[in-house]
Amino acid sequence: MKNYLTALISESAIRHNIAVLRGLIGHDVKLCPVVKDDCYGHGMDVLYPVLAELADGFAVASPTEALDLRHRGYEGFILCFLSAYFDDYDIQDELVRQGITQTVMSKSALASAQAAAERTGGTAPVHLKIDTGMGRLGVPARQAADMVTTIKETPGIKLTGIYTHFATADEVDKTATVEQLKIFKTVWPVGGDVIHHAANTAAIIDLPETHFEMVRPGIAVYGCHPSEQLHNRIEFKPCMSVMAKLIAVKHVPKGSRCGYGLTHEYDRDSRVGIVPIGYGDGYFRNLSNKAVVRINGMDAPVCGRVSMDQMTVDVTDIPDVQVGGEVEIISSDPAAPNSVENLARLADTISYEITCHLGHNMQHVLVD
Ligand SMILES: *Cc1c(COP(=O)(O)O)cnc(C)c1O
């Protein structure tokens, strides 16, 4: 971790986003934020206390992420999307002891949960995942009924939920999503106190009929939109800004070049700043010669290629630039050229990838 790179995480933005999401769902619908990959790179250390107070549960990808939440003291509902199939027995067993809800998406996943229940003498709560068209994890819908029966007959296992995941909910054309929804509904009813859930952020925004008893928002919690197509329909507030400090400032004569491949040439006598962030810190290399950072509120273009641990920015037009000066790598203002969404556009990716990559090498600090 580099303590000269700081991600400032706004508590009020998180509270705002959760309130907006709550406003979109019914009062009795549970809100279960998805906090996989260290809260999409925003930092579980700072976000846990805020989210634990606001959420009805948490969804994570891996068993170790689930156990981490218990170690932080979380006593509520935790859903783990992946199977513990490849984890050591002590992790598999701990999931059962800690009452963490595992996903069953295959007979092998069911068998490993059952074995852990047997070893610990406990009961493993599970949610069955149905593949309704995403073609990723999940039991094919036509096998769902059989699987439900099998799960119900398996000792040590308690079926508490059934869910699916949408492939195209973030597109304007909802044909495929509506089809997935139709298929999902054919696996009902299951009876008992089994809950159903399907909605990611995009479906929460666009398809109220998918909210059922629980929703699983990820990206909107952190203030970004799930896609360009759903952009600006709802006012989420990006919660993260990323700051660095200039580690050098120097003059370079007209005609000089910079960076690997010497891909940038200065067309005037210039002043440049060196910023200690690079693709090793998750700042995308394909932002080379495209993105800007901001210094004293003004744009400083990234010049030449982004290296592993540093990059060069043009500060010729910015007064009062000094070594040690603050550099805003990511702005929390969605309209800024260095907002997560604008950088995602420039890097030809999605905001999710920008934030996940950026989180790992820096200190996270909770602000207002
Ligand atoms: C990541 C994930 C989500 C959250 O999706 P967003 O688009 O970030 O809201 C929901 N459900 C599952 C199964 C996921 O893997």
Image (cartoon, grey):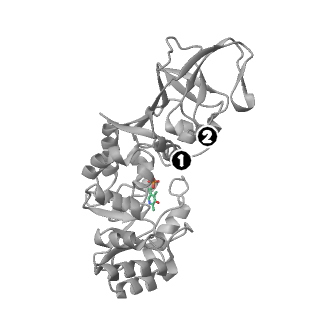
In front: 27, or 17? 17
In front: 195, or 273? 273
Which image quadrant is residue 299 in? Answer: top right
In front: 209, or 355? 355
Q: Is residue 12 above or below residue 230?
A: above
Find numbered disc 1 in the image and state the secondary structure of the residue it sits on: helix
Find numbered disc 2 in the image and state the secondary structure of the residue it sits on: loop
Q: Is residue 317 above or below residue 74?
A: above
How far across and how far down the image is residue 155, in percent? 33, 86
Labels 1 & 2 near each other (Cβ < 8 A)? yes
150 on left or right of 269:
left
Is residue 82 in view from this perspective? yes
Could you give the CA–CA distance between mark 1 and mark 2, rounded to whole angstroms?
A: 10 Å
Q: Residue at x 32, y 41 (%)?
A: 16
Mark 1 or 2 closer to N-term?
Answer: 2
Q: Is residue 191 above or below residue 286?
A: below
Q: Residue at x 27, y 50 (%)?
A: 54
Amino acid under disc 1: Glu
Q: Which residue is mark 2?
A: 347
How far across and how far down the image is residue 266, in percent? 70, 18
Is residue 162 in view from this perspective? no
Q: Which residue is mark 1?
A: 353
Q: Quadrant of ligand 1?
A: bottom left
39 on left or right of 11:
right
How far across and how far down the image is residue 4, in percent? 45, 31
